[in-house]
Image: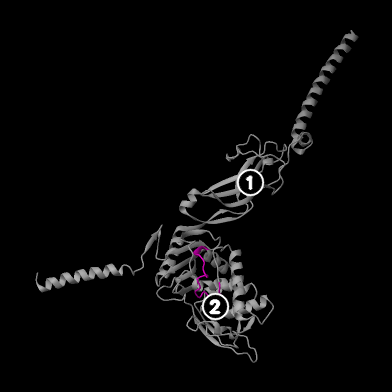
Amino acid sequence: MNFYDEVHTYMRKLCALLIFLMSFYITPMAVHGTVTLTAPSAILIDRATGRVLYSYNEHARMYPAGLTKMLTALVVLDYMDPDDIIVVGTEIYNVPRTSILSGHQAGEHITVHNLLRGLMTRNGNDSAVVLALNTVRIQRNNHNVPFVPGMEIFSGMMNERAEELGAVNTHFVNPTGLHNDNHYTTAYDLALISQAFMEHPLLREIAGEAEFIGNSLGDLVIEGAHTINHNWEDSNQLISGGAFHYSYATGIRSGTTSQAGDCVAASASRRGVNLIAVVLGATDPERWHDARALFEYGFSTYEYHELLEVGQNIKTASIPNAMLGGDNILDVLSADNFTYLLSASQVSRLERHVIFEDRFVEETNDYYSYDYYELKLLAPIMYEERLGSVIYILDDQVIFEGAIIAAQAIQERSLDSDMDFYIALVINNVFSLQALPYWLGVAGVLIGIAGIFFAVNERRRSRRSWYSRR
């Protein structure tokens, strides 16, 4: 082997070794079901119902970083109005200068609305502590609550709010999301928090803002107020433009710490379908790819199906004991609307059951045979009276139960009603204009019969007269 061949062999081995070593540092792409993700924990839910559409390690304990601020905003708005004005204090000096800041100054006058923009759009930790401390002071009716106990009290308020939302595996110790080993949550819990966040009109609006450029008091003019002009750009690259912009994205918040990794809670809307995706512990830029992959899976797999609408005919029943002369066929109607997000395979597995209250059902009735006229219900039935329920079941779980009502009133048959019916029948057939031809016919027959009798009598009388003259 010559010198060049030895060098070539050596280089091939070196390249193979480098590739082997690099494989330990490249984030693996994991295929979970039909979604390819890099994140160790993720979830996709229907924003309207909170129903889980896709999940992977959604209950694993993770650090939330700046996604914490969604819950901060919810607690703040439980106690303050967006138009309230806050004077920033020295609490901002308790935030690490190396963390993300909105750039507030002590003595700055700013609306709660714009502080929430600093919190969500800029992801400012100074905005978070200003909001948190002032919320506690209002809640305690004490404007002298110090910073440290104020943060402890606010963290307790956050945990109570999280539990109310069903986020029972969440424990927060600050309003910022700065790392603390006891500050943790799960993708599932953050999805619930995200859902509540997006239900609030103001927060939903802020979540979709790619930037904020304006004065801390907006258009308000207060004599002697110290204001600042802010210029904040959202770090959620799904909505802020650039290479990872997603045209259907509507929010919400991204966050990063060395312990939490790169995280995002995102929302997107397409053709009336509103989804929320949470990605935790990823890296950049994979978190944006993961969120997009979850949304594309959701939009391509699920669509809304209108399963019921008010007044829709569910079944038709015969009423064997209905009063004579009245309706004996009853339409059973839905009293509710029901629209549900379903995949094609779920549509094929969906079951519908109609259950009637016992007092309306004949003992011989087949409860699970609902062909027209095979279903028999018992009168009396009032107009729009609740007859029972319509139930939808998917994979052995009840997903909807609504009322079914009567389209019309049906009276019960009785001896008195039968007598009334036959009397009315006679009256209607004997003493009505419709019966006049029959009466004329009867009169004609009677007149004819009377004429015959008269003719016969006249003939007999004539004969007797003739015999008497002889």
Q: Which residue is mark 1?
A: 332
| Residue 426 painted magenta | no
Give the residue type that dot 1 points to: Val
**Residue at the extreme right of the image, as rendered:** 469
Specify the segment rendered in magenta: 173-188
Residue 310 appears in the rendering: yes
State the image coordinates of residue 1 (x, y, percent, origin top left).
9, 69
State the image coordinates of residue 418 (x, y, percent, origin top left).
76, 34
Q: Which residue is mark 2?
A: 119
Work out whether residue 246 or residue 380 is closer to the camera in this orientation and state it: 246
Quarter of the rendering containing residue 376 = top right
Please determine whether, in this image, residue 446 is positioned above or below residue 307. above
Please tell me how crowded label 1 is: few (under 14), some (14-19), or many (20+) other residues with Cα within 10 Å.
many
Quarter of the rendering containing residue 297 = bottom left
Give the residue type that dot 2 points to: Leu
| Residue 177 painted magenta | yes
State the image coordinates of residue 128 (x, y, percent, origin top left).
56, 78
- Label 1, secondary structure: give it: strand
Task: Answer with mark 2 or mark 1, whichever residue precedes in sequence.
Answer: 2
Work out whether residue 284 or residue 168 is closer to the camera in this orientation and state it: 168
Left or right of 110 on screen, residue 123: left
Left or right of 19 on screen, residue 167: right
Please determine whether, in this image, residue 338 is positioned above or below residue 212. above
**Residue at the extreme top of the image, as rendered:** 470
Please tell me how crowded label 2 is: few (under 14), some (14-19), or many (20+) other residues with Cα within 10 Å.
many
- Label 2, secondary structure: give it: helix
Q: Main secondary structure of the magenta part?
A: loop
